[in-house]
Image (tube, grey):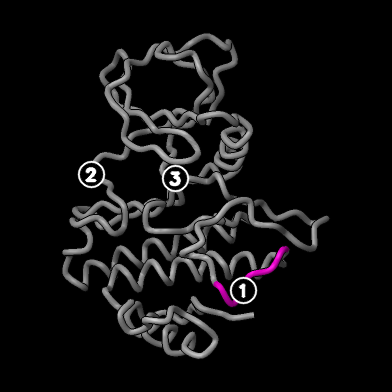
Amino acid sequence: MEENPTGKKLPFRRINTVGKGGFGKVSLFDNHAGEKLVIKNAWKNDKDLEHQYAILKYLKHRNICSNYLCVKGKTKHDGRFGIIMNYLQDYTPLLDTKLRHLPVREKIIVANDILRKLVLLHQNHVVHGDIKPSNLLANPYLLQARIIDFGGAVRFRDDKKSYRPRQYTRTYFPSCRKKKEYTWEEMCDNDLWALGLSFLQLFHMTHRFPEGINDRNASRANRLLRRKLKTNVTFFRCL
C-alpha cells in the first residue's frame, strides 16, 4: 500500500457510483491504462477514512480484504480525499441472488473461506466490528471471498483492557451481549456472532430461530453451523 505524497489530484475518470450509505459513497473509476478502480469518499468526516486507511495499511494482507492497492489521495473528479482500491469484478455481497442460489456444497466452500479470513484478521490483532452480508463479498465462480469496509475496525493494544465498538449494525449485534465496553476476546466473539447470523441467512436457516439467537438457543445454532461447516468454532457465545 502506498500514499500519494505529492498531494496532486490523481488522473482517474469516474464511471458510476457502485454503492453509498450513511458514511459516504463508493465510485467506480478507470485510469489511463484502462484499469478499473474504486474510490471511497466520506460525506463529511474524513477521519473515518483516515482510520480505515490506517487499518488497511497495517493489515497489508491480500487474503483478508479487497484492497490489493490502497492509495490515499485526491482525484480530478472532485478533488476530495479518498481511499483508492482495486475493483473486484464478479464479487457480490453474500446474500446476492447469485450466491444464495449456489449449491449447498459451494456455499460451504465460500462460508469456510470467509471464516478463515476472519480468523486470520483476529490473528493479525484486528476486529472488524461491522460484519454483515453486505461487507462479505464472494465470487460465485471462483468461490473465493473478501471482507470489506473497515470503518468499524479496532486494533488490539497492549495498554488497553477494554474496547468500545466504533460502529455496528444493530441487526447483527448480539442482544444478549450489549454493554458499553468489551474485552478483546469479547470483541472477537462479537465478530463471530455477526458472522454466524450471516451464515444462517446464507443457508436459509433463520426460520428455525424466529425469536432470534439468545442464551436459550445459542447452543443449538452453534451445533447447526458446526455440523454444516465441519468446524469447532463457537459462533454464538452469550455473556
Above or below — where is 98 with respect to 12? below
Left or right: 174 with respect to 207?
Answer: right
**Residue denoted by label 2:** 90
Of residues 102 and 213, the one drawn nearer to the viewer in this rendering: 213
Q: Quarter-wise, where is residue 18 in the image?
A: top left
> Which dot, 3 or 1, sits closer to the camera?
1
Kind of residue at disc 3: Arg
Q: Decide: is 113 above or below 65.
A: below
Mark closer to the chain start, 3 or 1: 3
Count of numbered circles in the view: 3
How far apart marks 2 and 1 lie (CA) works out to: 36 Å
Which span of residues is magenta-colored?
A: 175-180
Quarter holding residue 25:
top left
Mark 3 — residue?
A: 62
| Residue type for callout 1 | Arg
- Residue 125 percent location from the top left of the image: 64, 56
Q: Residue at horizontal 32%, vertical 69%? A: 201
User: How many C-alpha atoms fall within 10 Å of the one at disc 3: few (<14), some, or many (≥20)?
Assistant: few
Residue 4 place in picture, x, y as percent? 55, 18
Cα–Cα span, label 2 and label 3: 17 Å
Give the residue furthest to the front.
211
Read off the residue under disc 1: 177
Mark 2 vs mark 1: in front: 1
Instruction: Look at the image and tell me in which quarter the C terminus lies.
Output: bottom right
Is residue 20 magenta-colored? no
The reply, left or right, for residue 107 in relation to residue 236 is left
> Going 22% across and 59% down the picture, which residue do you hit?
99
Of the two numbered discs 2 and 3 in the rendering, the one whose residue sits closer to the viewer: 2
Looking at the image, tell me whether mark 2 or mark 3 is earlier in sequence order.
Answer: 3
178 falls in the magenta region: yes
**In the rendered view, does 38 fall on the left or right side of 95?**
right
